[in-house]
Amino acid sequence: MQEDIESILIHESTILARLDEMAAEITRDYAGKDLTVIAILNGSFIFVADLLRRIPLPLQVDCLSVASYHGTKSTGTIHFRQTNLPDVKGRHVLILDDILDSGLTIHAISTRFLDGLGALSVKTCVLLEKQVEKVKEIRADYVGFSIENKFVIGYGLDYLEHYRHVSSIGVLKPSAIERVAAESKNKFES
Ligand code: IMP
Ligand code: MG
């Protein structure tokens, strides 16, 4: 697995140090408020686990599963895997996602919570933000790291469901991208 990685972009220790800062800021901002955290699966699972354990506030956690990417490309549409959304009436909502890329995912989800679900406020928090032109003009309220426009894996982020458990954030070798794509195609066709 390590041999598939071309370079490490952000080391695990750097990520964890940044989470201390983000958690302190979120703790200050939400003290005394009824907070519901919505984790966007699958990519945010490690980020959420590490961040929330640094926030000593009463809060509720719910998960939403959405998909927009296939391989290294966004499909441009957001697919909600469940029809029942969490009850956030009268609560402050903080959406946690792994990465803000085109902005489509965060836009679709925050719109759902603001329209008709009765949330008092909706804010977003992402570990990574890509420096790309957004399809939807959306900014995250809390951003861990701003990164260049490269496809990254690790710390929850996948390539065709591989590499989520790599502890740091890195870039794959082109040979690994090709091999995993070929394996996935074979599996699909057989
Ligand atoms: P957006 O809707 O274009 O902002 O894309 C956000 C979603 O696409 C994220 O939640 C990720 O699951 C996925 N994604 C975007 N960029 C990357 C990447 O570089 N590596 C892995 N997944 C990514
Ligand atoms: Mg993904």
Image (cartoon, rainbow, N blue to C red):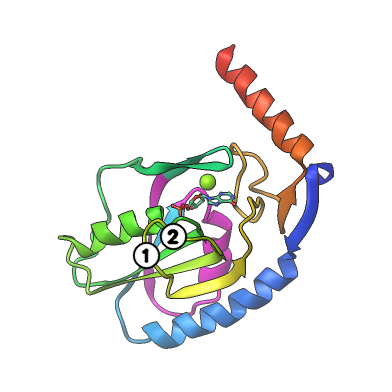
**Residue 100, percent from left and from top:** 49, 60
- Which residue in the structure is indicated by mark 1? 137
Tag 2, which secondary structure?
loop
Query: How many residues crowd around disc 1 within 10 Å: few (fewer than 14), some, or many (20 or more)?
Result: few
Asked if disc 1 is less than 8 Å from ligand 1, the answer is no
Disc 2 residue: CB within 8 Å of ligand 1: yes
- At x 80%, y 49%, the residue is 6
The image quarter containing residue 83 is: top left
Residue depicted at 50% across the width and 57% down the height: 101
Q: Tell which of 159 and 21 is nearer to you.
A: 159
Q: Is residue 65 magenta?
A: yes
Instruction: Give the number of callouts.
Output: 2
* Residue at the extreme top: 190
Stretch of the chain drawn in magenta: 41-66
| Disc 1 to disc 2: CB gap under 8 Å | yes
Residue 121 lies, in percent from the top left, at 26, 74
How would you rate the neighbour count of disc 2 (Cα within 10 Å): few for under 14, some for 14-19, many for 20 or more?
Answer: some
Indicate the position of residue 4 as horizontal and vertical percent values.
79, 42
Q: Amino acid at mark 2?
A: Lys
Q: Residue at x 39, y 76 (%)?
A: 58
Identify the residue under disc 2: 134
Which amino acid type is marked by label 1? Glu
Measured Cα–Cα span from mark 1 to mark 2: 6 Å
